[in-house]
Every structure is written in structure tokens, then in C-alpha cells.
Amino acid sequence: MDRNGSPGLSRMSDNVPLMFDEIRRAFVKARLLAVWSLATIAWAGACRDRPREAVPPAIDAAATRKPLRIAMIGKSASNPSFLASRLGAENRARALGAKLGTPIEIVWMTPPQEDASVQVQRIAQAVTDHLDAVLISCSDSEKLTPAINDAVAHGLPVMTFDSDAPASHRFAYAGIDDFKAGQAVMKELARVIPRRGKVAVLSGNPNARNLRSRVEGIMNEAAHHPELTMLGPFFHVETPQEATAAVMRAETAHPDIVGWAMVGGWPLYTQTLLRDLEARRATPFKIVPKIVSINALPPQLVYVDQGLAPVLLAQPTYLWGEVGVNTIVDKVLLGKSPPERIPMDLVRVTAGTLGSWARQLRAWGFPDAPEEYLQRP
């Protein structure tokens, strides 16, 4: 109690040290807050004045994915039919790769000339190189079956096109029915040649299973035309030059041939035979044989236009590659189970359909589809 008897003043003086402590703490806190604020302002200014670092570009996820690599092995790199199939495969690979976000590469491993032994080596190379699938047209199914089976045993799925190896472990085949194709060739030829005469059969590689089946179809249909005498088959290396030479040799030995049933259109890829047949037209009493052949690529269409080949039965060679890539992607990337056999149809090409067929070839990417035919109805 103070001298005046008031208790409040005494309590206040007792609390003075506490009050000063609180004031001191508040002052220190204020100083710290001020320092922090100034530091924050300075840091912000420095950040504002400092040039911004470049933002790293976004990584394209598709570009970093492991590509699907498909070994494509046709019979011969000199055969336009397989060049067409390559074009179909590469175009489809680009389109599907962009759609699925996974690069798809076509590794072209076709021998320069037809050789089943080289095809066997190329399959082994695909295994060694750890490719993801094989798409092959078999020059000799018996030679290739063990190689295909070995690839499959190493985890490399194999699909065939054009020429099959049905006894192998390949998972699918895409192509025409070769026996029926041979029958169709002979039916068409029988309509455009005299009732009697000699008909020659041209068939490239004797070991190619698809060509043997076509010849069998021709002979089966020929049995319904006993008035016709069948010659051949005449075998040859599957190049335009060798095929033309085989035709010329047969014509020399049998100048009375009235028709050619060709299971492949090899001699029609050049104009050597065309010039010979046109020269015969100008020579009295010379027989100008009619030709019906499988395949109708741009260089062959002039034979139709000139009436020397009234009918060509076109294989969709471009689709060999396109369908092959589709099927392999379905199995390998998408986990689907494709059918074991994928049938394809022949297209009948005549003088009346040259325009539409030429436009189809151009749409498939053939720059040499003749311009004059493109304008036809």
C-alpha cells in the first residue's frame, strides 16, 4: 500500500519491468519485420530485373518411344510388284505411326534378285538385329519354312504375303487364291483366242508355291477346252529381260502359238515384246498371240491399250504392304488376333477400265500411271 493508502500505484510500479520487457520485444519484432520486408522487396526487384531463363521445350513422348521395326522381304527388288508393296507399307507405316504415337519403320531387306537362300539369310539377320516382325513373300516355301520357324521360336512374329509358306509357324497370310487366279486367266484367254490352237503358259520361278498353284489352276481350266493344245509351262528368272527372252524362245520354237497364259506379267514391264508383236501385225500371215496375264502395273497398261493383252488381272500389290503393316500392328502393338488368311481379290483391267484403274494406281502413289489414261472415263 502506498503512502496515500492507495494499493493501485504500488501494483503498477511493481509491473514496470514487465512492461518495458514487452515494449522491447515488440520493438525487436518490428525491426525484424522491417528487415524481412526490405529483403523481400529487394529479392523481388532482383528477380524482376534478372533475364528469364529459357523454358526447356516439351519432350515429344512419341519421339522417345521405341519404334516398331518391320523387316520387309519381297522376292526381288527388281520386280515392280514388290516395289509397289514397299510403297504401300511405308505409306501406311507413317500414317499409323502418327495415329498411334509410336514410330513404325519398314526395314527393306529384299534381295536384289530372287534368291530363296538370300531370303533365309535376311530372316536370320532380322533375328540378330532384334527387329519386331517380318513380312515376307516366299520364293521357296520349303527352304523358308525352317527359317520362319526359327524366327518365331526367337519371339519374332512372321507374316507372309503374295507367296505363302503354309506349313510354317507364320501367323497370317495375305494374298489372292492362286489356284482360282490361274483358272481365271485361262477362262479369259479362252474367250479371246480361236477355238483351236496352241496356248503357252509362262511361269517364272518353278519353286514358288504361288506360281505352281496358278499353273495348276490354268491346267485345270484348260481341261475344259480340249480343242486347245497346252505348251509349257516355260520357267525363267523373274526379271523383265529373262521373261521376254523365254517368250521369244518359245515363239521361235512354236510360231503358231495363238495365246499366252501368264501367271505373272514380267515380260510386259518392258516394250521389247510389244515392238515384236506390233511388227508381226504388219507382216502378212504372222500370228499375233493374245495375252492374258496377272498384274497390271503402269508399264503393262500399254499392252491393254494396243489390244495385245485384252485382259489383265491385277493384283492389289500396293495393298500387300498396307494390309501387311495393318495386320502386324494389330498383333504386335494392339494385342489383337488377326485371321490366319486375309483374302485379296483380282481386279479385271480392260480397255474399258483403263481410266479408272490408272486413277487407282495414281491414288496408290504411282507417279508413272500414264497421263493419257488418267483422262479417260
Image (cartoon, rainbow, N blue to C red):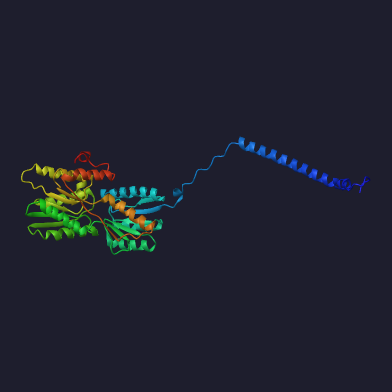
Do we see residue 111 in this rendering?
Answer: no
- Residue 143 x %, y %: 29, 61
Q: Residue at x 72, y 39 (%)?
A: 34
Q: Is residue 147 left or right of residue 2?
A: left
Q: Residue at x 32, y 58 (%)?
A: 159
Do we see residue 34 in this rendering?
Answer: yes
Residue that lies at the very extreme toward the right in this rendered image: 3
Q: Nearer the viewer, residue 101 or 198?
A: 101
- Residue 74 x %, y %: 30, 53
Q: Is residue 23 left or right of residue 330?
A: right
Quadrant of the rendering where the C terminus is positioned: top left
- Residue 64 x %, y %: 46, 49
- Residue 342 x %, y %: 28, 58
Q: Nearer the viewer, residue 296 or 245?
A: 296
From this view, report whether residue 213 is shown above or below residue 366.
below
Q: Is residue 184 left or right of residue 167?
A: left
